Image (cartoon, grey):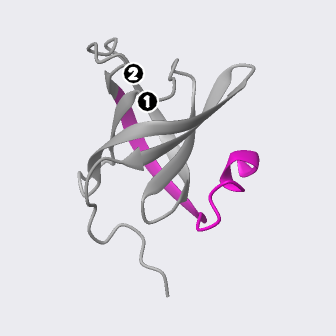
Amino acid sequence: MAGLARFFPEATPVRIPVQLARSFTRDGNAGSNFSESTVIEYGTPREVLFACTSPLEFADIVRLRNADGSLDVETSVVAVQYHPGKTVVAARFRGEVPNWIVKS
């Protein structure tokens, strides 16, 4: 995870459990019906980084939602690193996310 995070200099370590689901694939087709629990490990004002076991690819559209619904956003996959048994993903918010990460 830290290997991908180095490409995002603003990345701050966070530990936010979320549910992810793919909405659309990069070619615009509806995503396969899967949902997976994961943890956002790093965040920037515009991106989140997490690991998953789901088969995500560049430009897939992914919805991330935390347990209380205070974070419920669509993101676009902007980077992937494949490892045995998991995929490390960087995804960019598709819209404005107020109060996401506030830098001091």
The reply to whether the magenta stretch includes residue 9 is yes
Q: Is residue 60 magenta?
A: no
Helix, strand or loop at label 1? It is loop
Instruction: Please provide percent x and percent y for residue 90.
Output: 54, 43
Quadrant for the N terminus, please.
top right
Which residue, given by chain and number where applicable, does mark 2 sit on? 26
* Mark 1 touches mark 2? (CB < 8 Å): yes
Residue visible at 73% across and 51% down in the picture: 2
Q: Which residue is mark 1?
A: 59
Give the image quarter of residue 62: top left
Question: On screen, 42 above or below 26?
Answer: below
Pinpoint residue 71: horizontal percent, then vertical percent: 29, 54
**Measured along the vertical axis of the image, is residue 71 above or below residue 20?**
below
Q: Residue at x 23, y 51 (%)?
A: 69
Q: Amino acid at mark 2?
A: Arg
Mark pair 1, 2: CA separation: 5 Å
Q: Earlier in the sequence, mark 1 or mark 2?
A: 2
Give the class, few, some or many, for how many residues have Cα within 10 Å of label 1's Cα (few <14, many ≥20): some
Q: Residue at x 42, y 70 (%)?
A: 101
Measuring 65% from the left and 65% from the top, which residue is drawn there? 9
In this image, 8 relative to 70: left or right?
A: right
| Nearer to me, 43 or 85 | 43
Residue range in magenta is 1-21
Percent of width and height locating residue 5: 67, 53
